[in-house]
Structures are given as C-alpha cells and as structure tokens.
Image (tube, rainbow, N blue to C red):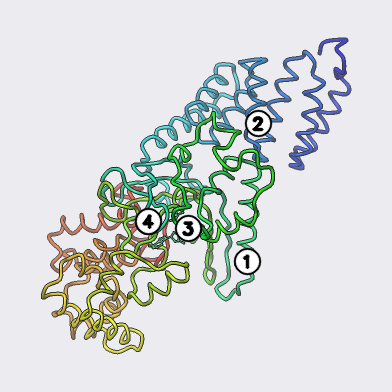
C-alpha cells in the first residue's frame, strides 16, 4: 500500500477488515460483506492489487444479490486498473456466464487462464461457455446421457434461445407468438429461463394452505428479481394483467427477449426511472401469465403419496396463447422451459399451448377456458359448435361419458359417423374430444373383444389424435401400447411403426435426446402418471 496516501488503510486495519469479510462470507451475509469490501476499496489508495481483489470480491457478492449492473461495474473498474487481474477476470466471466453472455464470458476465462488463474476449473468453465454459446445459437439440446443415466444429480445447464418465432397481434386475443419458418414436430421454438419458480412437494391430501406457501414463496422471488433488475421488471410490465383492451396490448420488439450486455443496467421501457415496484400490477401479471411445471426430474425425486408442484414465470413462453388444437408443448429441465412443436407448424402459423387438458369434449373445455377468463375462439371449438347434427351427437355422447355406459358402443357410433364424410383433421378433433371413451374401450379386453373389429386400432387412433392436437404423454402411452405387438395393427410394417412411435415421442418431449435414449423416455412415460413432462 502506498505510504502516506490520505485515508489509506494501514496493514493492521486491512488485516482486520479481511478477517471481518471472511466471517461475513462464512455467514453468507452478502450485504455486510459488500460494506466491508467497500471500505477496503475506499482505503486501497494506489495499491492496485488490494483494490482489484476487493472490487472482484464485491462484484461476486453483488451478483449473488442480483445486482448485476453493480457487479459488472466493479469488474470493469478492477480490469481498468489491471486488465489481467485473474480474480476480476474470473468474477466477470462468472457474471457474464450467469447472464447468458457466453462468448464474452469465454474471453474472460481465456484471459484468466493466460494470467495463471485456476487452471482445470477455469478450463472446464471455458468449455462450458463454448458449448452453451453454440447451444444458444442453434437451440440444439442433447440430454441423452442424463436421461440414459436416469436423471442423476443436477439438471444439465442450458442456454436461452429464441428460435424461428416472433410476437405479433393474434386473432386469439392480444398478442401471440408466431412461427416465422416451418418447424417439424419436435423442433425447438425457444428455450427460456424462468424469472422465478416456486416448487414444493405437496402431500396428496394437502389443503390449499400448502399450495399457498409455494405461491407466496414464488411471488416473493418474482418481486425480488424485479426489484434487483430493471430489465426483468420491464419484461414483466410488458405482460398482460388481464385488465387491458386488446388494442392496449403493444407488440414488444423481439430484441427485448435477446439480452444484450449493453442493455444491462438500464431498462427498455416503463421500469426505467421507476424506483418503486408496482406490486399490484405484478400480482395481476402473475395471475394471467404463470405456467405450471410438471417436472419429471422433480417427480423422480418425490416419494409416493406426494405430488410435485412447480409454478413459474417464463417471459416469452407466457405470450403463447391457448388453442384446443395446440401445436406446442414445454419440456422443463431445471429452470429452463424448452418450447417445442408438438406437431408440424407452418411458417406464419400461430404457436399455441394447451392451457388445460384438451383431450376432453367441448363442454368441459369451455368450462376450463372460462376458469382462465376467456372464451376460446380456436377452430376446433368453432367446428364442434357450428354443425347442428354433430352438436346433437356430441351432447348425447358427452352425457354418456358422464353417466357411464358402454364406451365401446359410443366409440363405434362416433366412428360410423366419421367414416361417411369427415376429413382426417376433424376426425382427429372428435377422437381427442372423446379420448376417455377410446381409452376406456382399449383398457378393457372384454370391450376390445366385443367392439374391436368395428373401430380402428389403438395405434391408429393415437396417430390421428397426435396429428390433431399434438403429442402428449397419454397419446404416446396409447401409441406404445397399441404398437407393442410390433406391427401396430394396421399402422404399417415394423420400421414404419417404429418411426411413427419415435415421431410421437419427439412431438411429446421435443428433440432433446438421440434415438437410443428415446427408449428410456418411453419406459419413463409408461411408468409415470399422465401429464408429466421431462
Ligand atoms: C398468458 S396470456 C397470453 C398472451 C396474451 N394474449 C397477451 O397478449 O399478453 C393469456 C391470456 O391470453 C388470452 N388468450 C389466450 N388464449 C386465448 C384463446 N384461445 N382465446 C381467447 N383468448 C385467449 C386470454 O386473455 C388469456 O387470459
């Protein structure tokens, strides 16, 4: 330390501050730690070594508290004083990596390696950044090793990715997400990291109280994230509260979803200059935009008699509207949601999720949409409502479904109606609406013996439903069961059948594993409850 500098720390004071910092570090008291680092920074005078390492430590603590702009500014000050300071390069690399800026993060780790920082660990970080940078650009994910090993340990790290999609005004209401290129079933549309997730393992018999604990914890995390990062607050304020008229919802620029380092620290819209969070507004946004996570990996960790509950906010995916013939699904891996095409999507088509179970008749779907606060305007609902002859048949079948009866007879009657004139897509819609009747028939060997010859095979029904409403676990299960004799009862020859099964597997989970690992997912699908994703 330079002797005689004003306010410079003497060796003894510096030693005392370092001991205090270590105690606070062990207690993970980051605010206290930042305070002590600041005193060292202020007293470091012209001692570059002391100054840079205190700035690097303060940057690390600021990042832990979510103050990314402050952390980045500390790293930059340290590197302005000493461009090869290993700890500052490592701190900046870790910060940029966490923010999804893999290429500049890799530059920092490369710099730290040449400055002699870390070696093996830094080499590993550099390798990770290269892999994530490539994945962020291509959207290609390969979870084969993790799946084949039975989902061990921590989830694989993923990078955010915005695929061939853009936000536009939607006929469904407000804004929606649209494909700008054709995407085949299983293709990745986007990979988004959650702003926050509330997770809990809730006993089956739990009342609403335990769910409220998960919700409260989640809301606190969202508010915390918004408070610390104006950009996050700005993204949240772009989402609908449910109170706006359609024309009041502005179409956001896609650049908003592609984080740039120069945007760090200042927001792109309303959150700028706004010190106090609009908590009421954020609460409304959460009500309209939260998505649930049915994570298979979380499910595997749970024990019997409990259900895993995950609720989260993923910004770009929450702009995806609902349709009863959806074409997209999510696969959850850690905090990332991989959104993929669940059936082929044409360029210009709107990307849609099922907000609720769409393997149900129109009446039940209407109730579910109302619970969400909207009237579904999708073409499947329109088709099921407009044809008066069909409407009568649907009312009769829905009543039979509710009151029980011979589900085989119901299916035969529906199939006879369809055989006459209906196009494949409409057949797929009706089969999806009466999926539970088809399942009851195929689940019961007595009914299969009685009615089996008069209806298409289970595999043919599964393929038809997947073409109409996309792949999902129930349909994949039916396909696997329907083809386990190897020929799929009229579904084609063995290789053709295998291709069809893999296609529905990809439509269900996305192209996240190689073909050989797909078998592990199939085993998992057959063993798990319906409606769980990865
Ligand atoms: C998560 S937001 C989807 C994005 C929203 N359209 C926007 O502009 O922000 C959910 C809301 O979108 C609207 N919505 C989604 N799907 C719809 C559909 N099929 N029919 C009518 N409104 C729909 C409803 O207002 C619903 O509460």
Q: Nearer the viewer, residue 75 or 124?
A: 75
For disc 4, the marked residue is: 329
Residue visible at 30% across and 73% down?
Answer: 433
Mark 2: few/some/many CA within 10 Å (<14, 14-19, 20+): many
For disc 1, the marked residue is: 212
Mark 1: few/some/many CA within 10 Å (<14, 14-19, 20+): few
Q: Is residue 59 above or below residue 372?
A: above
- Disc ID at residue 245: 3
Task: Check contact, mark 3 vs mark 4: CB within 8 A.
Answer: no
Q: Is residue 22 above or below residue 418?
A: above
Q: CA distance from mark 3 to mark 2?
A: 40 Å
Where in the figure is residue 420, as x and y percent of width and height?
A: 10, 75
Where in the figure is residue 107, as x and y percent of width and height?
A: 51, 22
For disc 2, the marked residue is: 71
Task: Check contact, mark 2 vs mark 4: CB within 8 A.
Answer: no
Label 4 CB sits under 8 Å from any ligand 1 atom:
no
Q: Nearer the viewer, mark 3 or mark 2?
A: 3
Q: Earlier in the sequence, mark 2 or mark 4?
A: 2
Q: CA distance from mark 3 to mark 4?
A: 27 Å
Ligand 1 image-quadrant field: bottom left
Q: Quadrant of the C terminus?
A: bottom left
Q: CA distance from mark 3 to mark 1?
A: 30 Å
Residue visible at 24% across and 83% down?
Answer: 393
Q: Earlier in the sequence, mark 3 or mark 2?
A: 2
* Secondary structure of the residue carrying numbered label 1: helix
Where in the figure is residue 82, as x and y percent of width and height?
A: 65, 15
Q: Earlier in the sequence, mark 3 or mark 1?
A: 1
């Amino acid at each position: 330390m330079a002797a005689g500098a004003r306010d410079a720390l003497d060796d003894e004071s510096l030693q005392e501050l370092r001991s205090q910092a270590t105690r606070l570090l062990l207690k993970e008291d980051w605010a206290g730690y930042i305070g002590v680092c600041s005193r060292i920074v202020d007293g470091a005078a012209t001692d570059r070594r002391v100054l840079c390492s205190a700035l690097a430590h303060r940057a690390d603590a600021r990042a832990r508290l979510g103050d990314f702009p402050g952390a980045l500014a500390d790293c930059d000050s340290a590197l302005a004083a000493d461009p090869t300071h290993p700890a500052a390069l490592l701190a900046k690399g870790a910060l940029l990596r966490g923010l999804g800026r893999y290429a500049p993060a890799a530059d920092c780790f490369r710099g730290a390696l040449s400055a002699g920082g870390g070696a093996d660990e830094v080499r590993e970080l550099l390798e990770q950044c290269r892999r994530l940078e490539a994945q962020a650009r291509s959207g290609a994910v390969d979870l084969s090793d993790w799946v084949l090993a039975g989902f061990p340990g921590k989830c694989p790290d993923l990078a955010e990715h915005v695929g061939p999609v853009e936000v536009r005004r939607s006929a469904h209401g407000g804004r929606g997400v649209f494909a700008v290129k054709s995407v085949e079933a299983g293709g990745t549309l986007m990979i988004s990291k959650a702003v926050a997730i509330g997770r809990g393992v809730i006993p089956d018999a739990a009342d609403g109280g335990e769910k409220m604990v998960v919700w409260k914890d989640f809301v606190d995390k969202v508010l915390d994230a918004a408070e610390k990062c104006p950009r996050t607050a700005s993204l949240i304020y772009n989402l609908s509260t449910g109170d706006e008229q359609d024309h009041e919802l502005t179409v956001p620029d896609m650049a908003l979803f592609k984080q740039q380092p120069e945007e760090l620290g200042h927001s792109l819209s309303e959150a700028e200059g706004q010190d106090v969070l609009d908590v009421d507004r954020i609460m409304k946004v959460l009500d309209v935009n939260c998505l649930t996570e049915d994570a298979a990996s979380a499910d595997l960790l749970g024990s019997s008699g409990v259900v895993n509950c995950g609720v989260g906010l993923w910004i770009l995916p929450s702009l995806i509207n609902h349709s009863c013939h959806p074409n997209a699904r999510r696969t959850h891996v850690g905090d990332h949601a991989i959104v993929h095409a669940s059936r082929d999507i044409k360029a210009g088509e709107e990307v849609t999720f099922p907000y609720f179970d769409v393997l149900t008749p129109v009446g039940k779907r209407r109730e579910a949409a109302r619970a969400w606060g909207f009237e579904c305007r999708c073409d499947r609902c329109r088709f099921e409502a407009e044809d008066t002859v069909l409407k009568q048949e649907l009312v009769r079948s829905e009543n039979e479904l509710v009151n029980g009866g011979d589900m085989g007879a119901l299916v035969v009657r529906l199939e006879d109606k369809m055989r006459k004139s209906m196009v494949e897509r409409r057949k797929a819609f009706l089969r999806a609406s009466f999926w539970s009747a088809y399942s009851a028939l195929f689940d019961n060997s007595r009914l299969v013996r009685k009615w089996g010859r008069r209806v298409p095979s289970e595999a043919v029904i599964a393929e038809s439903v997947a073409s109409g409403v996309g792949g999902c676990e129930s349909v994949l299960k039916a396909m696997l069961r329907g083809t386990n004799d190897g020929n799929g009862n009229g579904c084609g020859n063995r290789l053709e059948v295998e291709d069809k099964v893999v296609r529905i597997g990809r439509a269900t989970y996305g192209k996240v594993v190689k073909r050989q690992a797909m078998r592990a997912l199939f085993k998992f699908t057959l063993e798990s409850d319906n409606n769980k994703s990865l």
